[in-house]
Image: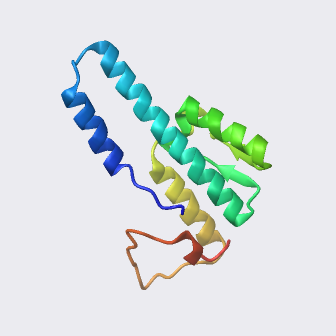
Amino acid sequence: GLDFSFSGLKTQVLLAWQRSDGSEATRAAVARDFEEAIVETLAIKCRRAMQATGAKRLVVAGGVGANRRLRAQLAAAGSADGFRTYFPRLEFCTDNGAMIALAGAIRLEAGQHNDAEIRVFPRWDLQALAPV
């Protein structure tokens, strides 16, 4: 599947840290391992999504796009699997709000709007979105 959550991983990291010796070396090791686990999970999920949809372009936006390891993993995955990865310049890898605003602007330009109704979807299936 493509669903994932890092809440269990965050809990395990916290517990590992609380049981550790608290040294700087341990702090660095825990942080590195946490980053590697997240990057690996995101890369796997992106690869699955690209394979499932047949898409040929992957845009990595928001703050996560600034992560060098993630950029390298996704670029390598794209090369291996035949899709291109696009990353904004680092100064544009900040708040996901900019990404959401752009997606909204594109949909508005395409004539997709409904002024009378606002619905909140805390878990929105991407398959339900109409293509632009």
Q: Is residue 95 left or right of residue 104?
A: left
Residue 61 shows in this picture:
no
The quarter of the image holding the C terminus is bottom right
Q: Say which of 109 and 103 sits in front.
A: 103
Does residue 40 sit above or below 130 in this rendering? above
Q: Is residue 92 left or right of residue 10?
A: right
- Residue extending farthest to the bottom is 116
Residue located at (40% from left, 34% from top):
34
Does residue 130 sit above or below 36 in this rendering? below
Does residue 78 sit above or below 125 in this rendering? above
Residue located at (62% from left, 65% from top):
106
Residue located at (38% from left, 74% from top):
120
Residue 52 shows in this picture:
yes
Measured as percent of width and height from the top left, residue 131 is found at: 67, 73
Q: Is residue 71 left or right of residue 16?
A: right
Structure colour scheme:
rainbow
The quarter of the image holding the N terminus is bottom right
Q: Is residue 126 left or right of residue 11?
A: right
Measured as percent of width and height from the top left, residue 28 is found at: 37, 20
Residue located at (57% from left, 53% from top):
45
Measured as percent of width and height from the top left, residue 54 is found at: 75, 63
Q: Say which of 95 and 128 sits in front.
A: 128
Q: Say which of 132 and 5 sits in front.
A: 5
Q: Quadrant of residue 22?
A: top left
Measured as percent of width and height from the top left, residue 37 is found at: 46, 38
Task: Report how many numbered discs are placed on residues in the image.
Answer: 0
Q: Quadrant of residue 112?
A: bottom right
